Image (spheres, rainbow, N blue to C red):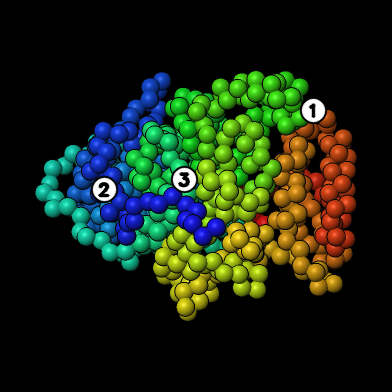
Amino acid sequence: MDEPYYYERMHISTIAELVDITLALYPDKGYCQYIVGSDIVTKTYGDLKSDIAKIESYLVRSGARHVGLLGATSYEWLSVLMACLHSGIVAVPLDALLPDEDLAYLIGHADVDLLFCDTKFSALSQQLGSNDCCETVRFLDADGEGSLRFEMDEQTLYDGPPVLNKDDLALIVYTSGTTGHPKGVMLSQGNLAAATYYSAAVVDPVPNSRMLVVLPNNHVYTITIIFLTGFFFARCMCLNDSIYHTMINLNRFDANRLVAVPAVVRLLKGEIDKQLLAQGITSLESLPPEQRTAIVAGIKQHLGKLHSIVCGGAPLDASYVHFFKLLGIQLQLGYGMAEAAPLISSQVENRIDYHRAHSVGRPGVCCEVDIVDGEIWVKGANVMLGYYKDPVSTADIITDDGWLKTGDLGYIDEEGFLYVTGRKKNLIILGNGENVSPEELEMLFADSRLIQDILVSGNSDLDIIQADIYPLPATVNVKGLEETKVLINQEISDKNQNLPLYKQIKLVTFRDQPFETTTSMKIKR
């Protein structure tokens, strides 16, 4: 396997360079589509070019250095982001699901001096003004004075953006984190360019590629893999108006691509399972070929032209890859973290010879990967500049010679494929010295029709492995809670038969409420 295992793409040193090239080449192609009432509105790359120039003119006029972005994914939100990345003004995307108190802290910590937000955050904008924090706020979804549109209508001379360097700070992205305070990840133009190149190099685009956007806009996963990678292919982004409208909007927009996290993939599979169960089908694979073909054709009528799903952000069991393969949809797994802009490793679309079950692909396009005492370390052009105003935490995670310690456990096989087995900080160390990865055990139940979520941990008093389980509500509604518990206990007993004694789940508790999650839908441990 010495030949390139990815697709060659145009090399770029900055995101500003990529934006310039795409806007010049594809003015008439659709950049973005979104729903207004019963209509679909289309904005072209030519529209974006014109609006970026107007926004950059205002940004220069305002004297802003750090620009906050807060709101739903909209054409206006995207236009401001791209204007910042194109002009060298630092963008700070913020999580719209956070409480106002947390948002005010992050805005202050990031030294945001100009905030663009939706009108639903007007109370927050007043609070910021009274606290002498970010006194300039402009609304994305309004007209008139105090809005983005009003400022764009002001005609002023603008000489164009400066020439940017790959080391120039481009983004400050706050990690959601499952524990502790969020940290401001500083990503340069070069960091984003390297990760975006890798993201483009592992997909095989179809003509007129159309991406349904379902993920939160404040994550670098969304920004790099969806918003920026699309510029390599002049892709059209279709803005989903609700996570619960995903299947409807796949059809409505005729979308053929989706970038997701495991929670979204599970939601999509759950909707498909409901359709199958309504027909009395519990397994697609067990059907005779002719019947399966007919059933799959019926399902795909509800999925538009979807043929590719990229999934990252957390581990996903290989059984999902097989399930979607039966539907003619390639599920492409990747691995990364915000501190790596975020892509570290990915499977390659339509290169099945470079896929391995449970692997997240072969790293090496934009970074080196090494395993040090079981932990995955990364070094390359995609590794962040550091944490904003936090040199101590930066020194804790990046070595003097530039290696990023991911905190993830894993290994690389003899062919160079990377496998992620869990988080170092979650590792359970038993009294007999054995180490157990809770994520490894949780993954055993990824395709369970009984369990919605499971959290495995160690019981230090009894020195055993325990599991806290939230049963699948749909199963509880049909079978009742007590029968569901019996079935779950039996499923755990069956799984235990194939595990070493020290890894077996010995204590099970059930909960009647879902686990608390981060805004990126990861369970808080």
Badge 2: few (under 14), some or many (20 or more) residues near its Cα, within 10 Å?
Answer: few
Q: Quadrant of the C terminus?
A: bottom right
| Residue under numbered circle 1 | 478
In the picture, residue 419 is in which quadrant? bottom right
Query: Are the residues at dot 2 and dot 1 in contact (C-beta closer than 8 Å)?
Result: no
Q: In front here: 352 or 429?
A: 352
Choose mark 3 or mark 1, whichever is in front.
3
Seen in the image, is 509 located left or right of residue 517?
Answer: right
Q: Residues within 10 Å of mark 1 (few under 14, many from 20)?
A: few
Which residue occupies 28% across, 54% down? 16
Quarter that holds the N terminus: bottom right
Earlier sequence position, callout 2 versus callout 1:
2
Label 1 is placed on what type of residue?
Answer: Val
Residue 177 placed where, x, y %? 56, 58
Above or below, comparing residue 328 to residue 89 in the picture: above
Mark 2 = which residue?
A: 21
Which residue is depicted at the point 49% across and 62% down? 364
Q: Residues within 10 Å of mark 3 (few under 14, many from 20)?
A: many
The residue indicated by pointer 3 is 203
Give how far apart the Cα atoms at labels 3 and 1 are.
Answer: 41 Å
- Disc 2 to disc 1, how far (Cα)? 56 Å
The residue type indicated by label 2 comes to Ile
